[in-house]
Image (cartoon, coloured by chain):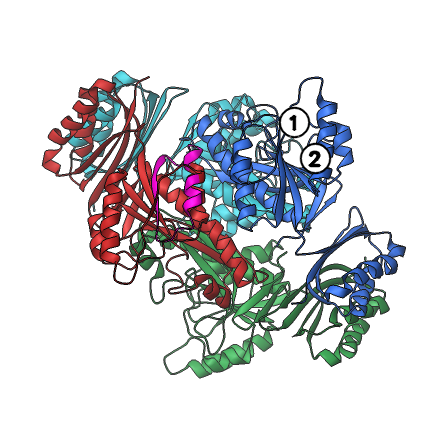
Chain colours: A cyan, B blue, C red, D green
Amino acid sequence: MTPTVVVTLRCTDQRGIVKTVADTVFEVHGNIVDSAQFWDRPSDSFSLRMEIQVDEGSIATLESSLIANLAEFSPNISVRPIARLRRALILATTADHCLRELLYLAQAGELSADIAGIVSNHGVLQPIAEQFDVPFFHVPVAPNSKPLAEARLDEIVTETDADFLVLARYMQVLSDEFCARHPGRIINIHHSFLPGFKGAKPYHQAYDRGVKLIGATAHYVTADLDEGPIIEQDVVRVGHHHSADQLVSIGRDVERRVLARAVRLHAEDRVFPNGMRTVVFDS
Amino acid sequence: MTPTVVVTLRCTDQRGIVKTVADTVFEVHGNIVDSAQFWDRPSDSFSLRMEIQVDEGSIATLESSLIANLAEFSPNISVRPIARLRRALILATTADHCLRELLYLAQAGELSADIAGIVSNHGVLQPIAEQFDVPFFHVPVAPNSKPLAEARLDEIVTETDADFLVLARYMQVLSDEFCARHPGRIINIHHSFLPGFKGAKPYHQAYDRGVKLIGATAHYVTADLDEGPIIEQDVVRVGHHHSADQLVSIGRDVERRVLARAVRLHAEDRVFPNGMRTVVFDS
Amino acid sequence: MTPTVVVTLRCTDQRGIVKTVADTVFEVHGNIVDSAQFWDRPSDSFSLRMEIQVDEGSIATLESSLIANLAEFSPNISVRPIARLRRALILATTADHCLRELLYLAQAGELSADIAGIVSNHGVLQPIAEQFDVPFFHVPVAPNSKPLAEARLDEIVTETDADFLVLARYMQVLSDEFCARHPGRIINIHHSFLPGFKGAKPYHQAYDRGVKLIGATAHYVTADLDEGPIIEQDVVRVGHHHSADQLVSIGRDVERRVLARAVRLHAEDRVFPNGMRTVVFDS
Amino acid sequence: MTPTVVVTLRCTDQRGIVKTVADTVFEVHGNIVDSAQFWDRPSDSFSLRMEIQVDEGSIATLESSLIANLAEFSPNISVRPIARLRRALILATTADHCLRELLYLAQAGELSADIAGIVSNHGVLQPIAEQFDVPFFHVPVAPNSKPLAEARLDEIVTETDADFLVLARYMQVLSDEFCARHPGRIINIHHSFLPGFKGAKPYHQAYDRGVKLIGATAHYVTADLDEGPIIEQDVVRVGHHHSADQLVSIGRDVERRVLARAVRLHAEDRVFPNGMRTVVFDS
């Protein structure tokens, strides 16, 4: 069967980009089977995602030709055979609901990602890693050891050949330096519907405020910003009869679903950070 | 056909309330056809809503007996034949999307409320009032005339026999005194999903922040609070391809649906303010 | 400001289509500002929708060049300046909830369509037409007069310059001949979530079955088929406490929202019928 | 801490039931902390669910007094300390998505049920049972061995002290006799939004029909009926770009969520079968 490759491209909008891509695909006898593009007028940036069927032997040519032919547009280009799954390194602390969801979906073949490993600053999640036969890395973080811990994290990223990091209720703040070393490659789940309740215990704040919906937000982590570009959000209806503790439980359910969806979208190269916003070509 | 009455009751929780209500309904040969109750533990307050079938001639007895038998619990009690619709006075400025929704639903018999009249500080909505054959009151508000305008509002409430007020994108801030005179009887639609973007142009703020959901919140207006107890909220999924102006348009659609639902819930005596929270017995 | 045109194209999938379109847009100095395409593998059909900014004076050239350059692909092509709204002729009987929704949205500028007129086999909706200042055509249908009535309908389509027809709870069955004369141009709202309850009183059937969700389906009307290609569907959560009559009322609310969304999608050239399926490029 | 008990009651509607219950709770110095009731007019049946705080030592008295005092109404009464979780026996074949969801939620304390064991007619799920430390029973079913297999099932129900059975994609049809022996105690997940596509491969049928929403239905299994009373349903939005296989994958996601919700509602004594309908007192 002819393989499918995912091509993504990001650049300033200019006339002729799509034409050049189409020409190039034509040259290598490829066939565009899915295509989504978006011109963001305020930022004048252009995002393109294509799925292209092309002979195994022509994939390298497709990539080099795209780079050569599009050089004048100075784009970011990525070419990935769809069968080569992106690899996620999961960071967690002690809560396991998001972690389990990701492990389950990866095992079921519904995450579009491989789990490269699990990192935790505690040891309690190790049995789950063993249950799912995934490498576990215990990286403690003490008040003064953050630089060391992050250096170890960088090593693990390399060792496990991870493409991106997922903070699955990881209760440590990453340094700006670490974030800057992995731009657009760290996904976090925020236990609130942003913009929402800031600070600790957002579900208890939500309870006190008497909200009728609670939600969660998956976003990229960036160095300079409290909360980076949003990838996915969702909410669930709640009522007066839910206690603050029940909101926490309902919140866990939303969190794991929202994070899993964001990870899948990212792993399928469907998310394009664009300043504080993202372009998401939903499947 | 035996009429149905809606009984609502609000008091501090004490043993024996439900028993006393059940005894009283039994005495007047009434039949409880729907019942919802809620004990809010943090505030120790008890809310009860019942629909009771009782002979026309026994409605007055039911009310007086409930008041007498429950006196020791010091409750707020309301007894209303379901056929006597609550009357809404709508306040608007120039935007007509919420107003039209309410007029349409009332005319279609799906709002559970009668429209007592429309008040606006502008004249542009008068033709709509005429279209729907509803009294229109032009009450201009100048920088120094707010007390006069609010005095006129109070008169209109009396003249039109209105039970509650609906701020359907009414762009005037009501004074604390006015709000205090109508506690739990003023419903506002907030063009954001609270807690959300504060200040002007929330949809443009939402656009800049790249949110994936936008929403609206219907709440009671209270004197002391920026944003009173929430009655109803909802959200709609949006994406990168929506411009800020499209978010405004989508927002209008959510606003009118959320406000209409809140008005119906209130008109059916299903909403019990409870501090900053509300108990809502959904239908 | 440079005008935007909507280009749609439908043909059997062949290599080179996108390239040819991109070349053509490039020739007339146009700029692709939005693009969506879909190759349906089972039917091997290709659908493309583009929004292109192009000088007023080049629109005609764009159209003729697309037709000439793409001739080998035998496509269906449509080129429409976005500012020239498609015109909807609404057919109704006596129920007014869908009709009012469409009139309201069109008036508010949120339907992306102009209302060309209202046709009814009864006279009761005439005052609404007058309220909204839209031409009203009373076309009675007696058992033997259907051919005459449909001939009159065809005349009205021509007179009002309507692009498509909307059956807004129109309780007459259109003949196969009439449907065949207006392929992909008649939209119906089905008061059920298809595949669902067939026959009369679907909400009462839904009640008897105890379903927890009820819905509505907007679809194209086709000559040979009971139920043509689906454009849009939605559902609402219901419960044991809703009577069959309440389901009817809730159903009306879903119906009008689903129909309005389908009309807007169609009017924006976002819907491509594809056998029993549709390709819908959501906004 | 004072324990909470869940009381449920089902009978023909008669005047005085609520009063009698309230009197009885009062006698044992209990406190009603949550109450939901419903009179189904078409069937004239009455359902009541209460959560009552009562001293440990008075639970038995509460139960015996309710039975004695309500005898004239011939109700079905259940009294269960909330801390004594209902026990679910899960039946599966080879698909594991629903099974894993239930195991995960039970382990996380969010299912309100204990997993008594897993039964399968295949052996492939045994490792999952071991992962989660739950008893596994391999009960093969051959064309002629169904009576034997069902006899073994009955034994397992007894051995594991199971309160109810969950068919988590169990691909065997249970006999009418077996179903009749466990009325209102077998929950199935139907891989379609009922009423929907009958027969094999519903998602492929859904694909062919071009539906825009797919869903799943959790229902009780009954002897005489193809599809018993519905407990819970949900849908997910899909589009033209989803292949039939993708619908299957999306469907699995809905199935597991809908089944898990139904199991939790049942385990919390919130579901009252009522002919073909159910009364569900949502939390």
**Quarter location, residue A87:** top left
Q: Which residue is mark 2?
A: B156
**Quarter of the figure with the N terminus of chain B:** bottom right
Q: Against B77, is B126 above or below?
A: above
Q: Name the residue nearer the viewer: D104 or B130.
A: B130
Q: Secondary structure at mark 2?
A: helix
Kind of residue at disc 1: Val
Q: Secondary structure at mark 1?
A: loop
Q: Which percent across, then down, holds residue C144?
A: 25, 62
Q: Which residue is mark 1?
A: B139
Dot 1 crowding, Cα within 10 Å, few <14, some 14–19, many 20+: some
**Quarter location, residue A6:** top left
Q: Against D96, is A249 above or below?
A: above
Q: Is residue D116 visible?
A: no
Q: Name the residue nearer the viewer: B105 or B130.
A: B130
> What is the chain identity of the residue bearing mark 1?
B
Please tell me which residue is depicted at 41% across the width and 43% down the height of the picture: C260
Mark 1 vs 2: CB contact within 8 A: yes
Tell me how far mark 1 sits from mark 2, CA to CA. 10 Å
Judged left or right of residue A76, residue C64 is left
Residue D190 circle label = none
The lab-note entry on whether marks 1 and 2 share a chain reads yes
Q: Which percent across, then down, holds residue C256?
A: 44, 47
Please tell me which residue is depicted at 62% across the width and 46% down the height of the picture: B114
> What is the chain identity of the residue bearing mark 2?
B
Q: Is-magenta flag for residue C128?
A: yes
User: Which residues are the magenta region?
Assistant: C106-130
